[in-house]
């Protein structure tokens, strides 16, 4: 029985996407690479496709974090600090759960990210809910759909 992991979204099958791996035994994060080339314009947010989706338990989420080397050397950050991929984002009807990384370029020059560049790390987390929790319903779509 599969509990958590990564898969390639159907649009990117056969495009040379590699599944994330931890680089060392004690690494918390799975390195996530860019699924295609992207140019990050200064002072702008760019959504970088990964070609990946993630599955996990209903009481888990995947936290997306910028790799520290890129953050320091290229003046990049995630626009929302940490990306959160909910369990019900997987295989949603809008985009199949495709993970897009929202990167902000703080520098004054464009930064070119090539396909395969390890851009972020994904860490799976468990979370707690409050007493008498009453969620609003089922996910209806993809990116940002729960706020509609």
Image (tube, rainbow, N blue to C red):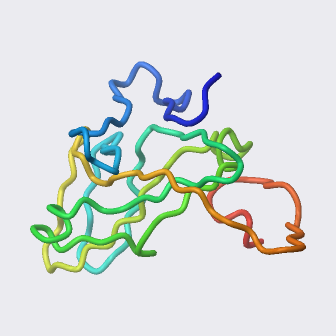
Numbered marks: total: 0
Q: Is residue 39 above or below residue 76?
A: above
Image-based side of 60 in relation to 130, left or right: left
Pinpoint residue 123: horizontal percent, then vertical percent: 42, 52
Q: Residue at (26%, 64%) from the top-left corner? A: 40
**Camera-nearest residue between 51 and 3:** 3
In the picture, the quarter occupied by the C terminus is bottom right
Left or right of 136: which side holds 123?
left
Tell me the residue at 52%/30% (across/down): 11
Identify which residue is drawn at 54% across, 32% down.
9
Residue 79, quarter of the rendered image: bottom left
Looking at this view, name the residue that lies furthest to the top.
Answer: 14
Which percent across, then down, holds residue 48? 38, 54
x then y, percent, for residue 54: 54, 41
Task: Specify the farthest residue to the left.
Answer: 73
The answer to whether residue 140 is above or below residue 93 is: below
Q: Position of residue 139 (x, y in %)?
A: 79, 55
Give 12 or 69, whichever is nearer the viewer.
69
Whether residue 144 is situated above or below residue 14 in the rendered picture: below
Q: 117 left or right of 2?
A: left
Quarter occupied by residue 10:
top right
Rendering quarter of residue 34: top left
Residue name at image x 65 percent, y 22 percent: 1
């Amino acid at each position: 029985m599969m509990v958590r992991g990564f898969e390639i979204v159907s649009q990117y099958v056969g495009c040379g996407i590699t599944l994330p791996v931890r680089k060392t035994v004690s690494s918390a994060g799975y390195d996530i690479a860019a699924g295609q080339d992207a140019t990050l314009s200064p002072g702008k947010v760019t959504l970088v496709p990964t070609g990946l989706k993630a599955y996990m338990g209903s009481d888990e989420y995947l936290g997306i974090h910028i790799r520290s080397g890129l953050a320091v050397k290229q003046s990049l950050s995630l626009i929302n600090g940490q990306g959160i991929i909910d369990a019900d984002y997987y295989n949603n009807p809008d985009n199949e759960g495709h993970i897009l990384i929202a990167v902000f370029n703080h520098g004054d020059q464009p930064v070119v990210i090539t396909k395969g560049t390890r851009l972020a790390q994904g860490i799976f987390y468990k979370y707690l809910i409050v007493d008498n929790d009453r969620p609003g319903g089922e996910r209806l779509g993809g990116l940002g759909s729960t706020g509609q």
